[in-house]
Image (cartoon, rainbow, N blue to C red):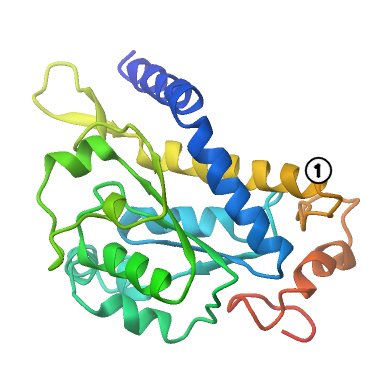
Amino acid sequence: MAFEPYIEAARQALDRLTRDESASIRTAAATVADALDAGGVLHVFGAGHSHLLAEEAFYRAGGLAAINPILDLRLMFFDGALASTRAEREPGYAARILEREDVRAVDAAIVASNSGRNAVPIDMALELRARGVTVIAITSLAHSKAVATRHASGRKLYEIADIVIDTEIPAGDAAIALPGSAFRMGPLSTVVGAAIVHSVLIEAAALLVERGREPPVLPSANLDTTSQEDLERPLARYAGRIRYLDVPGG
């Protein structure tokens, strides 16, 4: 069947991630663990489809409570798909997005951009680093090195971030040739990007446990054994720090 090569491509991409990026994931996880240990949070940002990784990390069953997704309507297709593409290329827009966020030097951040070439994710990394935040990039080096940057600095995301986790996604993202057609389909960046995000969070939680600290893990809200208190307890310590929380004191 036509879809089977895509599943195989995804499997191989995840195998490459385990083989090639374990050290980078471990380094990123240590940064996140240090931030949480010091009372900070992890900001997660992406433009275009990469914004899905910020939503994936936030308020996730089996994830961590200390996640601040940096979301923006213009970058999330609400004003139109092509408008989102234009917004992602807008110099200075990242600084305006960050004006409504509580960002502190103790925090860590993930900035996701498959191409790593557009102004907003690059500016976001620069703005976060200027505030003392360690920036972890999730990006495709193959794609990024195959295209020109659209940032005035002449640099790309991987050249700015403190830690780079390479998705190893091919340029163009689409992984397979459609049989009988010249078109390619099967994007992998979201599949691999989500695996990277959760790998970093799992490893960070394990490091906190090693340090004798309790990681702020969220249970599923859709289990009969999970109470409202079970949900609110890990979230409560981040009330006031994360924009989208709705807990007492938030």
Give the residue furthest to the top.
Answer: 1
Height in image: 125 above or below 19? below
Q: In which quadrant of the rendered image does the N terminus lie?
A: top left
Q: Which residue is drawn at 18% across and 73% down?
A: 90
Residue 144 placement, left or right of 204: left
Residue 215 is situated, as x and y percent measured from the top left of the image, at 78, 54
| Residue nearest the viewer, comparing 9 with 16 | 16
Q: Is residue 59 visible in this depiction of the protein? A: no
Residue 119 placement, left or right of 188: left
Height in image: 168 above or below 95? above
Q: Which residue is drawn at 77% across and 86% down?
A: 249
Residue 6 placement, left or right of 120: right
Number of numbered tags placed on the structure image? 1
Q: In which quadrant of the rendered image does the C terminus lie?
A: bottom right
Q: Is residue 114 visible in this depiction of the protein? A: yes
Residue 82 is situated, as x and y percent measured from the top left of the image, at 17, 64
Height in image: 208 above or below 126? above
**Badge 1 amino acid:** Glu
Residue 239 is situated, as x and y percent measured from the top left of the image, at 72, 79
Q: For residue 241, which quarter of the picture?
A: bottom right
Residue 184 placement, left or right of 45: left
Q: Say what secondary structure mark 1 lies in.
A: helix
Residue 117 is situated, as x and y percent measured from the top left of the image, at 20, 55
Q: For residue 193, which quarter of the picture?
A: top left
**Residue on which the image places disc 1:** 210
Q: For residue 183, which quarter of the picture?
A: top left
Label 1 environment density (alpha carbons within 10 Å; few <14, some 14–19, many ≥20): few
